[in-house]
Amino acid sequence: MGGRARLAALWLLWCCATIAPAAPAPQVLTLDSGSVTTTVNGQTRTAPLRLPYHWDHEQAAQPGSARFDLPFTLASRPDEPWAVFIPRVGNVFDLRVNGALLRVHGDMERGNGADYAKAPRSLIIPAQLLQPGENLIEIRVRADTGRRAGLSAVIVGPSDQVLRQYSRAYATRFTGSVLLVGFSVVVGAIALALWLTQLDARAAGGRTREGLYLWAALAEFCWALRVADGAIISPPLSWVPWGMLMTACYSGWAASAMLFCHHVAGWHRSAYMPWMRGAMALMFTGSVTCCWLSLTRADPRWLTGWLALELVGAGAYVVFFAVATVRRPNLARVLVGSAALLTVAVAFRDWLTIRLSDSHGETTWVRYTSVFFGIALLAIVIRRFRTASTQANELLGTLAARVADRERELATTYARLAEAGREQARTHERARILRDMHDGVGSHISAAIHQLQSGQASQAGLLRTLRDSLDQLKLSIDSIHLPAGDVGALLAALRYRLAPRLADSGVALEWAVEECPPVARLDAPAMRQLQFLLFETISNVLQHAGASVLRIEAGMHDGVQRLRAIDNGCGFDATRAPRALQQRAHAIGARLTLESRPGRTVVQLQFD
Amino acid sequence: MLVAMPPLDAMDLAVPRPWGVWVVEDDSHARAFFETSVRRSAQLRWLGGAGTVREALDWLRGDGVAPDVVLVDLGLPDGSGLEVIAAAVARYPQCEPLVISVFGDEDSVLASIEAGALGYIHKDAAPEDIAQTILEMKAGASPISPMIARRVLARYRLLQTASRPELAAPTAAVPPLSAGPAEKADAGRSLLSGREQEVLTLIARGFSYAEIARLQGLSVHTVQTHIKHLYGKLSVHSKNEAVFEAMRLGLLRHPGSD
């Protein structure tokens, strides 16, 4: 039993320990009531306060200043430092706790300068400043027209808890904005580089730049500047021109994004494109004008109204785009259409929240949805490059196949040409042999037969005919190896072949053959003609001239190759040149000149 | 060259022994023509003839009189006369083969020279010219035509260029007579001597031996001697050329490459 009693006592102790209340943790306080003293146009009023305090709504966008008194009660002085977190306060402000000035942000005496309302604010309250019982936080602000001035609910409490909330809000509004700016700048730079380097091959002439990339780049740069404004406390311009610039960026982004959609859909080639451009220009200039009116006349309804119109127009366009995408979907249209629908919905929410509602600590969401446009653009670019790469590969494959086909055709043609060339060479060779046999051996053998048949032929005459025949045959064989145009080789071979006959005839030969360059026009058939011509010339001298000396000359004279056969025989009528000689000279393009008198006959050939 | 000296005749020492001539020719009329031509010359002696390669080889294997001059037709019914020339030179190194050629064309004459022939004789020559050609050859002359001279020059140029790449510049088949000292020095190192090259060049241009002798300041006999040396070189270098080509093609290893 003693054991049971001990167990029961332990259980009781545990229960007591569990149920016993802990020391009360300090509570985070949300201060949203107190009093406000405003000074607008020289008139000061004090009124009860309920935060958030949206200045433009409360004071009809008139510039002025205010002091917010926010009392709160503490049971005891806290042991640790406290902190204040204000989601939105400005445009410039200072803050006091129990009369002690803790923070001043901006010049309270001059408006339209810095804007500290863009980022959440926090500060530490030393514990000794707080006191048990009533405490007071006093915030003075100076408000500019149309700049979302005012004060949101103020969070005060232990510093660790309050600063945690502040960090979350700061990350959402400030750090997030900086990251978005970086993303937009990178995407814009890529789009601009593509616009500068890529040409639209489908356009007439194939040298037009892609408008798609230009509008994407403009949209991203406009958006980058617009979002960057969230991190710019002290703009380089005063508020009115800076506010107009920011509005221009917003509308420029919207117009560029819609033109980007237009290009994605392929509508930029339609006849209505100038109307679209005009509408976008109107939207842009209208918003800037309304912004100017709003700020200078201290009446935000101008801009609010215009933005509503813009929103309706953009919404109608996006719906139209979405319907067209449903009808003819493709990846680019679906991506861009989805981003546009989401953006319009979010923009509508922002318009309601920022322009109409009294909420003051809220921020725009549309800044995040713009990322989807960037992602859609990158997806389009990647898809285009993949398509282009595939097409290039296919083109290369096709080209390689065509080249291979053409090479095969060329090889076939070359083979046919080579065969035709060989056949032509064989034909020429056959023709040459037939011509040689006909002109040389054939005619000599025929002559020999006639001589024998006539019964009047002398043995010497018959022998001469047959020797002529054999000599012709030898010359014909020599001509096979004669280099084309080499007249020197031809003369040397001719002399060698005719040497026995020259010796038999008793005619002395003078050989005055100089080294001469080849005659280009003398191809193989022409060399054979020249050989015949010289053979006949020398045969005539040996048989008919009765000469004692035959001189063969060859050389260059005045740049012209000249051949001469000179004998001291009886001569002949030079006006009646043997027809065969003339024909052969004409055939090889040589100029034949005859000069004859008793004692000197010159047969001259010149290759002009 | 070893030449079979005629035996001393005790009765008449001044009269040399006639040169023994042996003919291989399938055409009986031609063979008879050569026989007649040889028998008409007191300085020549007819040893006999053969009509086929087989007959010729059988004759060479016999113990007959060693021929001084062998006339061989290339186109024999059972083979090439080149085979007979090679066998004759092998059996009787002192004999001097002459090719019987109808046309004296370059291809057949060069092939014969490379097989060991020392000249060629035209089939249509006059009987007295046949004997004269044989006697001239025995006296130291060898015939050569301008066409053959050109071919020989071209081939030696090619060989010279191939073995010395720095001389690879294109050259004419017939070099100019006015060769400079450097070119002559090159020629001196080549397979042909400078003088032989000059003589060949003039022959290729159609000049006779007498004209060459006059132009070069030589005797006709010296010119003929150059040509005969050339024949010997052609025969030897035809074998060297084959070896060179085989080396160039990688079929043989160079002796110094190990």
Image (cartoon, rainbow, N blue to C red):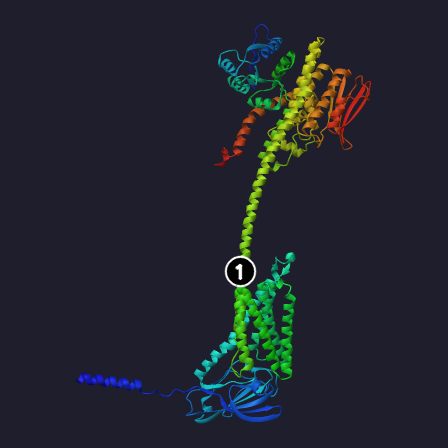
Does residue B201 appear to the left or right of A30 in the view shown? right
Residue pushed farthest left?
A: A1
Provide the secondary structure element on which disc 1 rests: helix
Q: In the rendered image, is residue A564 in sight?
A: no
Q: Nearer the viewer, residue A349 or B155?
A: A349
Quadrant placement of the C terminus of chain A: top right
Residue pushed farthest top?
A: B11
Does residue B198 appear to the left or right of A537 in the view shown? left
Q: Is residue A92 above or below residue A483?
A: below
Q: Label 1 sits on what residue type?
A: Arg
Quarter residue B41 falls in:
top right
Q: Label 1 crowding class (10 Å Cα cut-off): few <14, some 14-19, many 20+?
A: some
Q: In the rendered image, is residue A174 in sight?
A: yes
Q: Position of residue A522 (x, y in %)?
A: 70, 30
Q: Position of residue B53 (x, y in %)?
A: 52, 16
Q: Chain of mark 1?
A: A
Quadrant placement of the N terminus of chain A: bottom left
Count the marks: 1
Q: Is residue A210 above or below residue A308?
A: above
Q: Nearer the viewer, residue B257 or A37?
A: A37
Q: Which residue is mark 1?
A: A383
Q: Position of residue B15 (x, y in %)?
A: 61, 9
Residue at the (49%, 76%) spot, across then down: A171
Q: Position of residue A569 (x, y in %)?
A: 79, 17
Quarter residue A16 falls in:
bottom left
Q: Is residue A389 above or below residue B252?
A: below
